[in-house]
Image (cartoon, helix red, strand yellow):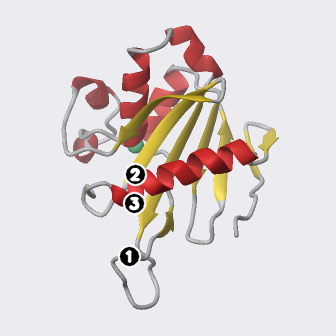
Amino acid sequence: MRILLLLKNFGKISLMTDRDTKHLHNLFMIARDIEPMGSSRMAASLVYKNRVISYGLNQDKTHPFQAQYAKNEEAIYWHAETKTIHNALRLMDVNDLKKTTLYVARAKHPDQGPVSENEWVWGNSKPCSGCMSCLYKYEVKRIVYSMDEIGHYGVING
Ligand SMILES: [Zn+2]
């Protein structure tokens, strides 16, 4: 059961929509199935006019684009969000990024109870400060991220 979350940001209040739920759920399935980088399984997508333009995953690879937004030496490896933006820049006009929604989700094993390899729950995928500076730079309109095992989501209006 999903719970809608109201989150105040920049004086605006956003509600999750059915579309948001659909996109986040899709990312959760992708994140669950990828190779983890450390303990993180993160997947992001950029949506324009209800169409997914690009995807991105956390990756064990460095790149100059990621390095621009790395907040420390451990953040030089691709983050799902920056990878998604980088992929989108090859596919769409930079001005249209202002009309997009960035979704990001984390899949993880539950913190409590017996650990089963097959049991997955949502984890907090709030973008780090480095990713936020990238998303602000390109003026991404909305950012939707998974928050916790219960299924809360956060929405940021850029
Ligand atoms: Zn990040």
Label drawn at residue 42:
2
Q: CA distance from mark 3 to mark 2?
A: 8 Å
- Given the image, on which type of amino acid does mark 1 rest? Asn
Name the quarter where the C terminus is drawn.
top right
Please state which of residues 33 and 63 is positioned toward the viewer in this rendering: 33
- Ligand 1 shows up in the quarter that is top left
First of labels 1, 2 by sequence position: 2
Q: Mark 3 near mark 2, Cβ–Cβ under 8 Å? A: no
Name the quarter where the N terminus is drawn.
bottom right
First of labels 3, 1 by sequence position: 3
Task: State the residue position of label 3.
Answer: 32
Q: Helix, strand or loop at disc 2?
A: strand
* Location of residue 156 by image quarter: top right
Q: Looking at the picture, does residue 50 appear above or below residue 92?
A: below
Disc 1 crowd rating (10 Å Cα; few below 14, some 14-19, many 20+) is: few
| Residue at position x 24%, y 47% in the image | 74
Label drawn at residue 118:
1
Residue 130 shows in this picture? no
* Location of residue 14 by image quarter: top right
